[in-house]
Amino acid sequence: QYNISKLFEQSFGAPPSAAAKKVNANLPIPINRILIENGAIKFLDADRNFSSEISSLKGTFSISGKNSRFKIFLAGRTKNSDRKNFSIGYEQPLGGGEFACNVSLKDELLSNWLGYTVPPEQAQAKSGTKSLYGKISGKEFNPALMKISLKASVDKGALLVINGPYVE
């Protein structure tokens, strides 16, 4: 088990600036519950009784001498997916500086994650997929100081709200 936030806070770059220390640096997800075990990343949130995972992980770690940068790329598949539909790429100059991280999730079943946002007794995903593309960059791993963008789409989604409407 590994607390991935420690990796970013302690390994990549300089210590947080005074400005970063004044701003609340807590991430909106319980990132300390992301586990890396046996070639899989497991997302566990005991507060919401939810878990998921990305398996069949493969990737590369490289250092470029030309521009003194290191790069990490990982790709894998999410639970119930028939192909690799998740990828993450991270790069940063050696010794710190502006980092960039791209995250992609394609054609993920809505039913795999709806339970995280809405309790199963309130809504059920009958069909559909979602795709997400996110980009994070900055000089410090602090949400208040980073540039964060996210694009999301839903395809052929159908949602049943218990004691409510059926949405397609």
Image (tube, rainbow, N blue to C red):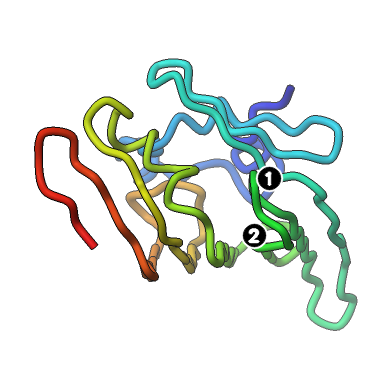
Looking at the rendered image, the quarter that the C terminus falls into is bottom left
In the displayed structure, 89 sits above or below 23; it is below
The amino acid sitting under disc 2 is Phe
Q: Amino acid at mark 1?
A: Ile
Query: In this figure, which residue is indicated by the disc labeled 2?
Result: 86
Q: Residue at x 76, y 63 (%)?
A: 73
Q: Quadrant of residue 100?
A: bottom right
Residue at position x 26%, y 37% from top? 123
Q: CA distance from mark 1 to mark 2?
A: 8 Å
- Name the residue at the bottom extreme: 66
Residue 4 visible in the current orientation: yes
Judged left or right of residue 107, residue 41 is right
Q: Secondary structure at mark 1?
A: strand
Q: Position of residue 58 (x, y in %)?
A: 85, 56
Residue 104's spot in the image, x, y percent? 57, 65
Quarter of the image for residue 167 reads bottom left
Q: Residue at x 24, y 45 (%)?
A: 160
